[in-house]
């Protein structure tokens, strides 16, 4: 049974993953090679816990207890040598991940389960430098951002692991309140990100073509498709509408929709211009620096309300 966890890499995803495990009663060792990140990571986790306290998800006492279950380690071996489950959320670079797993393979217990939070890199590549036995205990466990609020985790089942091991990891995630998606093929993007990018491709294209302003594109999605998708998946929605209608609509619309195989030029131009979204102050919208914290909190409050509402419809 998984009881002690290591989270390696403490950036956007890693610190949130660690905090989520800790909130749910797990002892978590954390490590990052960046000294500054290690020094500030408890503040980052604490800020997210304070948000949960503010919104009556946790008490102040529970938040303090949770933070106490997180141990910041000074080395990789200290963090990972005696844990049941080690998940990495380091930079999305295959060589970096291969090197990390190679080191972990030599220092972790034989029964330790390895996981990667990536959805964009293939598991086969990340397993190249570990032993044959360890490959039987490696999975992709892809979280969505922000980890402490988004309730889905995608777990790989590609044939390298047993059904028993998969079920052990799946139970870990069910114990922390996540909905698990069993992914059967080793494809880039897994399931959720492929759906998300299919939508994003057409959204960026509509902006590029001047079909509607950003606020109206977002409004059309929020109060149109996403309104249904909040409680029903796209295949269920198709069934409810009638597959004959969806077939005709596809024939009529798809020839006029974006089919490019790389990122939209508008998106690429904004990246070149340094307009990266809220992190830089401007993306498709503008984010005055004095309002950034409030905007982020409001965004997370909407996610939290949706999380609470979604629990009314759980099977």
Image (cartoon, rainbow, N blue to C red):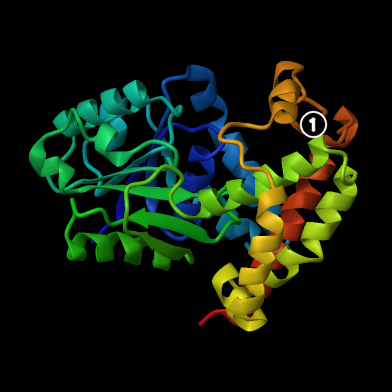
> Could you tell me residue 119's position as x and y percent?
44, 43
> Could you tell me residue 228's position as x and y percent?
70, 72
Please, is residue 49 above or below residue 6 in the view?
Answer: below
Quadrant for residue 129, please give it.
top left
Which residue is more in the foreground, 28 or 284? 284
Look at 59% across and 46% down and name the residue there: 197
Please, is residue 107 above or below residue 299 in the view?
Answer: above
Look at 49% across and 26% down and name the residue there: 38
> Could you tell me residue 43's position as x and y percent?
61, 35
Left of 110 or right of it: where is 265? Answer: right
Which residue is more in the foreground, 284 or 37? 284
Left of 167 or right of it: where is 117? Answer: right
Q: What quarter of the picture does the N terminus occupy?
A: bottom left
> Could you tell me residue 19's position as x and y percent?
51, 48
Specify few, some or many for label 1: CA neighbours under 10 Å numbering under 14, 14-19, or 20 or more.
Answer: some
Look at 52% across and 49% down and name the residue there: 194
Which residue is more in the foreground, 67 or 14? 14
Left of 74 or right of it: where is 164? Answer: left
Q: Is residue 181 visible?
A: yes
Q: Is residue 56 visible?
A: no
Q: Secondary structure at mark 1?
A: loop
Which residue is label 1 attached to? Answer: 283
């Amino acid at each position: 049974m998984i009881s002690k966890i290591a989270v390696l890499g403490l950036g956007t995803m890693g610190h949130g993953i660690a905090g989520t495990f800790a909130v749910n009663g797990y002892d978590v060792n954390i490590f990052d090679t960046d000294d500054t990140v290690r020094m500030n990571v408890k503040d980052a986790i604490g800020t997210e816990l304070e948000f949960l306290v503010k919104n009556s998800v946790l008490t102040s006492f529970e938040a303090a207890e949770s933070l106490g279950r997180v141990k910041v380690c000074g080395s990789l071996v200290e963090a990972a040598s005696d844990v049941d489950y080690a998940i990495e959320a380091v930079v999305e670079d295959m060589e970096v991940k291969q090197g990390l797993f190679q080191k972990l393979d030599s220092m972790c217990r034989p029964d330790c389960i390895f996981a990667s939070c990536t959805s964009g890199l293939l598991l086969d590549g990340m397993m190249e430098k570990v032993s044959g036995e360890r490959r039987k205990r490696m999975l992709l466990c892809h979280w969505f951002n922000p980890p402490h609020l988004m309730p889905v985790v995608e777990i790989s089942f590609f044939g390298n692991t047993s059904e028993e091991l998969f079920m052990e990891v799946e139970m870990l995630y069910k114990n922390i309140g996540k909905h698990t998606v069993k992914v059967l093929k080793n494809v880039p993007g897994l399931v959720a990100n492929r759906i998300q990018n299919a939508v994003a491709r057409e959204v960026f294209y509509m902006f590029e073509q001047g079909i509607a302003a950003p606020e109206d594109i977002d409004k059309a999605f929020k109060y149109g498709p996403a309104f249904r998708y909040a409680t029903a998946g796209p295949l269920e929605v198709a069934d409810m509408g009638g597959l004959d209608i969806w077939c005709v609509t596809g024939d009529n619309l798809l020839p006029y929709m974006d089919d490019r195989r790389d990122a939209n030029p508008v998106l690429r131009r904004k990246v070149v211009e340094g307009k990266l979204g809220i992190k830089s102050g401007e993306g498709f919208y503008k984010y005055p620096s004095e309002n950034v914290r409030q905007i982020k909190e409001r965004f997370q409050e909407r996610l939290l309300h949706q999380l609470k509402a979604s629990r009314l419809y759980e099977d």
